[in-house]
């Protein structure tokens, strides 16, 4: 797989004590990052948006370890040193060294990011990877 970027993944988790969502940051190096600019014409005029496609090879260098989404949720707040893929997480293009409290923090800083709307575990086969779709 040809890799062309690094990403920062923000995984959300719910803290029962504070009753707030929190975001854990993981930098993942050596991924394939692609953005498609889509334009369509509808009843309300011209609509445009970006479609993000990210592929993460299984052998990427990352301090944190991948765990499946169900294990992530079962651990609650005990997820330090791990990352997962789940809808509504955020993927930032490049390395982002800030901790966030809400997605608007990234927008305010002008970071290019997407909200994960789909993902798949493609670790079986000749080119094992995870695929992320976002908008």
Image: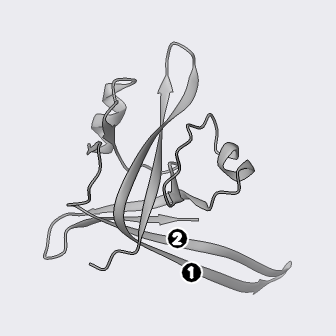
Q: Position of residue 135 (x, y in %)?
A: 59, 65
Mark 2: secondary structure: strand
Q: Residue at x 64, y 82 (%)?
A: 38
Query: Viewer-proximal residue, 110 or 73?
Result: 110
Query: Viewer-proximal residue, 89 or 58?
Result: 58
Marks 2 and 1 sit apart, C-alpha to C-alpha, by 6 Å
Please rate how many residues cluster around mark 1, counting C-alpha atoms within 10 Å: few if below 14, some from 14 to 19, many from 20.
few
Task: Kindly identify which residue carries mark 1.
Answer: 36
Q: Residues at badges 2 and 1 in contact (C-beta under 8 Å)?
A: yes
Q: Residue at x 22, y 61 (%)?
A: 58
Q: Residue at x 65, y 49 (%)?
A: 106
Q: Position of residue 36 (x, y in %)?
A: 56, 80
Q: Where is 74 relative to 35, above or below?
A: above
Q: Position of residue 78 (x, y in %)?
A: 34, 24
Please rate how many residues cluster around mark 2, counting C-alpha atoms within 10 Å: few if below 14, some from 14 to 19, many from 20.
many
Q: Is residue 110 left or right of residue 27?
A: right
Query: Viewer-proximal residue, 123 or 2?
Result: 2
């Amino acid at each position: 797989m040809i890799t062309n970027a690094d990403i920062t993944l923000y995984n959300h988790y719910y803290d029962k004590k504070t009753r707030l969502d929190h975001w854990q940051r993981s930098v993942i190096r050596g991924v394939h990052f692609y953005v498609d600019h889509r334009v369509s014409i509808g009843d309300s005029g011209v609509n445009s948006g970006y479609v993000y496609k990210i592929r993460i090879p299984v052998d990427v260098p990352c301090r944190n370890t991948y765990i499946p989404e169900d294990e992530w949720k079962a651990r609650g707040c005990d997820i330090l040193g791990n990352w997962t893929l789940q809808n509504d997480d955020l993927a930032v293009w490049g390395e982002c060294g800030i901790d966030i409290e809400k997605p608007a923090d990234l927008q305010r800083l002008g970071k290019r990011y997407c909200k994960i709307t789909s993902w798949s575990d493609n670790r079986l086969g000749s080119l094992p990877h995870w695929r992320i779709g976002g908008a």
